Image (cartoon, rainbow, N blue to C red):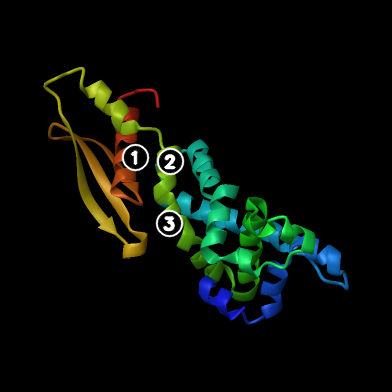
Amino acid sequence: MKALEQNLRYNFKNKNLLINALTHSSYANEVRNGILSNERLEFLGDSVLSVIVADYLYKNFNSMPEGELTKLRAALVCEKSLCEFSKELKLGEFLRLGKGEDKGGGRKRASILADAFEAVLAAMYLDGGMETARKHVMRFILPELEHTEDVAFKDYKTALQEIIQRNPEESVSYVLTDQSGPDHDKVFEVEVHLNSNVIGKGKGKSKKQAEQMAAKQALSLMGAEI
């Protein structure tokens, strides 16, 4: 268990919470004797994860409409993503599985690993509070955000460029105007210029995202469909 706590970067005060989070229903059903599976923790972890990610996106993507926020959150917390997070933590090695599930490859099954990530998150939330849970989640979400932004964002920069190219004498440029926050959690602010005029501003967790948001604002102000 110490090895897992090292992977989690968190030491549990109540070790039973972690043990419960690692207990699959196949093990609980096989052993019985009052042992509970991690299903209730999984239920709680799903909600904690959703709140943390939604809160972060709401505060850091203030130009993004509800539909795109929903799409981005779904991409960040899908089963595939949670499975990869579990693999990074090596949760599969510590799961308590029934003999049949274990022999059938349960330690590598995507659904089991994704559920385990949520259950462990809930255990951390109950043991250490919301900030402990938030710190744990953002450790995975921030890098994942870079991978999913192309899925979540429409390519507003290309759309804007196509409109501007209709007038060959016009040119578009993107200017970084500000960056704030610690290295692991920076916010970038960008202006998009048409010749020397500012036609849009945007913020994002990377320069690329901020440029897309600036282009989106420019398109909106121009009355283009976005």
Up-down relation of residue 157 to residue 74 (above or below): above
Q: Quadrant of the C terminus?
A: top left
Residue at 60% from the left image edge and 49% from the top image edge: 79
Q: Nearer the viewer, mark 3 or mark 2?
A: 3
Residue position for label 2: 64
Q: CA distance from mark 3 to mark 2?
A: 17 Å
Cβ atoms at labels 2 and 1 below 8 Å apart: yes
Q: Secondary structure at mark 2?
A: loop
Give x and y (percent) for residue 165. Answer: 20, 21
User: Are discs 1 and 3 less than 8 Å apart at CB?
Assistant: no
Work out whether residue 174 or residue 217 is closer to the camera in this orientation and state it: 174
Instruction: Tell me where residue 63 appears, x and y as whole percent.
Output: 40, 42
Residue indicated by mark 3: 142
- Above or below, 125 against 73 in this view is below
| Amino acid on which the number 3 mark rests in the picture | Leu
Quadrant housing residue 184: bottom left
- Binning the other alpha carbons within 10 Å of mark 1 as few (below 14), some (14 to 19) or many (20 upward) gives many
Amino acid type shown at disc 2: Met
Q: Which residue is mark 1?
A: 213
- Residues at marks 2 and 1, CA–CA distance in whole angstroms: 8 Å
State left or right for residue 34 relative to residue 83.
Answer: right
Describe the element under mark 1 as helix, strand or loop: helix
Marks 1 and 3 sit apart, C-alpha to C-alpha, by 18 Å
Q: Is residue 73 above or below residue 162?
A: below
> Which sits earlier in the primary sequence, circle 1 or circle 3?
3
